[in-house]
Image (cartoon, rainbow, N blue to C red):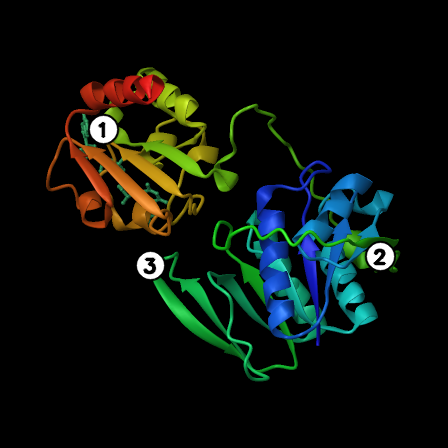
Amino acid sequence: MSVLVYTENTNGSFKKSVYEVVSYAKAIADSLNTSLTAISIGDVEQSALTALGNYGASRVLNVSSDQLKQFVNQAYASVIAAAADQIGADLIVLSNSFSGKGLAPRVAAKVEAGLADGAVELPDVSSDNITVKKAAFSGKAFAITELTSAKKVIALNPNSFELRETGGNTTVETFQPDIPGNDLAAIIQDIVRTTDKVTLPDAEIVVSAGRGLKGPENWGMIEELADVLGAATACSKPVSDAGWRPHSEHVGQTGIAVSPNLYIAIGISGAIQHLAGVSASKTIVVINKDPEAPFFKVADYGIVGDAFDVVPRLTAAIKAY
Ligand code: FAD
């Protein structure tokens, strides 16, 4: 069995989640005593492709095509399936990122594989059936899934596996499969907002605020705390529904699911729908003036106090540190 990992690029470069999924696929390939091949689709610089060797990919299939400049689920899935066929891969690993969520089931259908999406740790590969621990019910529970099919697809939840640099080398090869015409029938246009801030899905630290902040005019202190920590900002659903913050910052069951190393929740009650998207965070700090706020039940550290008093003092203390 050889292993294929899909390395998604964002505007031609790889984000941390790519090195994470390559490290994860490499660890599985090592357990299976086999090699790891990566597939990259789109215009990515040669140096970035070569750098995949440092995380364990011994070979990179590089697909560069004008037809594939835009991400199109069906076409990308066909290309990944063709690559798996070409190298005889029985296991395909992807990131369970926003686009990975659409891609993974399509790839699995094309190669007739069982799918475990939302994997949170290394699978058990000690038998032909691979057993995967995965997040279920919007992160409220874990499920143990056994993949019994000959071919298998695993999609790893972002921020679930550490980066592992192996110091290895890779060879980059051009790969040009035929793309079925139907796959390109619908073209999706990406509208990418550029920002110099840390983006939410990739953030190691997230500073998040809720209705306790009273109004959009009070987000200056949230942004200042995020700036001193190098963090991304997030918010609860009612905050984005009210237009206080953009929808791209809404975390939870119906928003983005995050699992940073540190999640700071300020003036957020901790409703179950909010927790569904943040409870996988490694450390949770809650600042709330109500000692009975449900969020404290899942907090690693809690501060009972008024956000308008606590947050500026916290920011000043971190600046002084
Ligand atoms: P509130 O519940 O109003 O809580 C505000 C908190 O701020 C309180 O705990 C209060 O004690 C505290 N506070 C007030 N003033 C201060 C102060 N000065 N200093 C410190 N603390 C203060 N919500 C999400 O967030 N994400 C989702 O994805 C999501 N999906 C949903 C899906 C469905 C189907 C439904 C029904 C609901 C969903 N919700 C979601 C909404 C969710 O149920 C809650 O209503 C919401 O999370 C509450 O937001 P909040 O904590 O900001 O506001």
Q: Do we see residue 86 in this rendering?
A: yes
Secondary element at tag 3:
loop
Looking at the rendered image, the quarter that the N terminus falls into is bottom right
Q: Residue furthest left?
A: 291
Q: Which mark is residue 181?
A: 2
Q: Is residue 264 left or right of residue 155?
A: left
> x%, y% of residue 244?
37, 24
Q: Amino acid at mark 3?
A: Lys
Does the numbered disc 1 mark a residue whose Cβ is under 8 Å from ligand 1?
yes
Marks 1 and 3, how far apart in space?
24 Å
User: Disc count in the image?
Assistant: 3
Marks 2 and 3, how far apart in space?
40 Å
**Which residue bears the numbered disc 1?**
212
| Residue 79 in the image: above or below residue 2 | above
> x%, y% of residue 103?
64, 57
> x%, y% of residue 237?
35, 38
Q: Amino acid at mark 2?
A: Gly
Instruction: Nearest to the eye among marks 2 and 3: give it.
Output: 3
**Which residue bears the numbered disc 3?**
140
| Residue 259 in the image: above or below residue 78 | above
Q: Which mark is residue 313?
A: none
Dot 2 or dot 3, earlier in sequence: 3
Secondary element at tag 2:
helix
Q: For the residue carrying disc 1, how many other residues have a C-alpha within 10 Å: few (<14), some (14-19), or many (20+)?
A: some
Q: Amino acid at mark 1?
A: Gly
